[in-house]
Amino acid sequence: MSVLPAIAVNPNTNIVQPLKANKADKRAAEEYRQVGLAYRQQERFDDAIDALQKSVALDPSNLDGRIILGWTQHLSKKYDAAATSLWEAIYLSPTSLQAFNAIGIVYLVRGDLSQSVVLHSWAALLKTDNEIAHYNLSLAYQRLKQYDLAIAYAQKAIELEPNNPHPFVANAIAQWTSGDQTSAKKTFRQAIGVDPRYRSPEYLNFLNEAGFSNDQIQTAKQVLASS
């Protein structure tokens, strides 16, 4: 268990022990949380964050409230704020799989690849069949040019979630950049078999919502064009 103290460090967060909320505060916090989720569904992110911050202030010990706030901040591209909220969630529950999955994605998307690898590796230790962690480790290692690891983690993600095209595309770009273009084209055809929309180069632009960088999306388009 010595890994956790090494990774659960965020020097920009001054965390204090949260006070416990009374029943009235918890009810009000839940109402704000539902309002925030409704705003998020409408992509009114500023309103959502405002409501969710009020929810957290009323019930600071509620783990889900902090994770929902952090993920909403991530969706609104407020990555530093998202990381702070999720570190606070991890402080409350150092074994929260949901919190580690989320913060690993935050660091991946903002380009802090080494930290993302550490966080997702811990998430994979918390739950060995954690397909989210394996998939995102593949994306991170591909960007770090550690292609064997990228391929291995993508293949594990495919094994865990065979009906999701994203791990297939992650595997294909890792194979392509490793020099194995034959395998990459075969793997990409498998992705199309799972979801025929991946025949369209334009559709691949949506991979940015699945953690792919712009360079990775361009690589995916190269593989598709050659398949």
Image: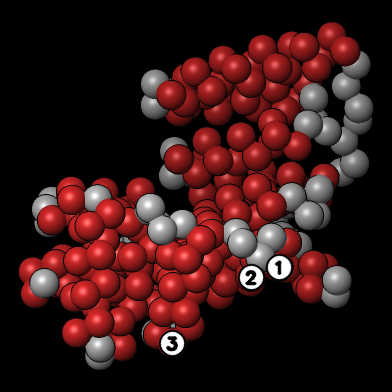
As drawn, the residue found furthest toward the bottom would be: 179
- Which residue occupies 35% across, 58% down? 166
168 relative to 183, above or below: above
The residue pinned by badge 3 equals: 148
Image x and y of residue 21, in percent? 88, 22
- Dot 3, how many residues are within 10 Å of its Cα: few (below 14), some (14-19), or many (20+)? some
154 relative to 77, above or below: below
- Which residue occupies 44% across, 44% down? 77
Q: Nearer the viewer, residue 18 or 138?
A: 138
Q: Quadrant of the C terminus?
A: bottom left
Q: Going from the N terminus, do you reach mark 3 or mark 1 first?
A: 1
The residue pinned by badge 1 equals: 125
Q: Quadrant of residue 19?
A: top right
Q: Amino acid at mark 3?
A: Asp
Q: Nearer the viewer, residue 14 or 225?
A: 225
Image x and y of residue 190, in percent? 25, 65
Residue 150 visible in image = no
Q: Going from the N terminus, do you reach mark 2 or mark 3 first?
A: 2
Q: Amino acid at mark 1?
A: Leu
Q: Is residue 134 left or right of residue 1?
A: left
- Rounded to the nearest whole Å, what is the CA distance between mark 2 and mark 3? 16 Å
